[in-house]
Image (spheres, rainbow, N blue to C red):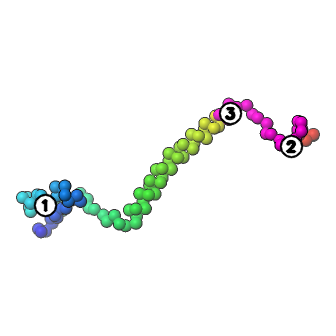
Amino acid sequence: MPEGKVFLMGDNRGNSADSRYHQDVADGTVPVADVLGVVVDGSRPVFTVVPLVVMSGLLALPVAAGLGIAALVARRRAARRPAQAWPVFGAVGPVEGPQG
């Protein structure tokens, strides 16, 4: 292979127009300067942990928004309702507070 050139292989070997199918120009090689990115080994733990953390954060946002909306609705409904006295169990008749 010539210096400063790379031979590219596609990840879908059965349906990839990689260097194997461009043998007519420079034996299918491409100048290194034309390469825009490189594939990084995905078996490292950081590549599996980071997406999980990001996805859990993205799932937490709608849950938090839903809980906030539910609390707002509950407060508005409680504000419309007249105040009710707390029931006193075991009392017979009206219960009076302390006499001052």
Left or right? Give the position of 72 relative to 96: left
**Point 75% across, 34% down: residue:** 83
Left or right? Give the position of 41 relative to 85: left
Mark 1: secondary structure? helix
As drawn, the label of residue 20 is: 1
| Amino acid carrying mark 2 in the image | Gly
Main secondary structure of the magenta stretch:
loop
**Point 16% across, 64% down: residue:** 7
Q: CA distance from mark 3 to mark 1?
A: 73 Å
Q: Identify residue for label 3.
A: 79
Few, some or many residues within 10 Å of mark 2 (<14, 14–19, 20+): few
Q: Is residue 80 above or below residue 22?
A: above
**Point 19% across, 58% down: residue:** 14
Mark 3: secondary structure? helix
Ranked by sequence position, the earlier of labels 1 and 2 is 1
Few, some or many residues within 10 Å of mark 3 (<14, 14–19, 20+): few
**Image location of residue 41, percent across then percent down:** 31, 65
Q: Identify residue for label 2.
A: 90
**Image location of residue 13, percent across then percent down:** 20, 59
Can residue 95 be found in the magenta stretch? yes
Ranked by sequence position, the earlier of labels 3 and 1 is 1
Q: CA distance from mark 1 to mark 2?
A: 89 Å
Ranked by sequence position, the earlier of labels 2 and 3 is 3
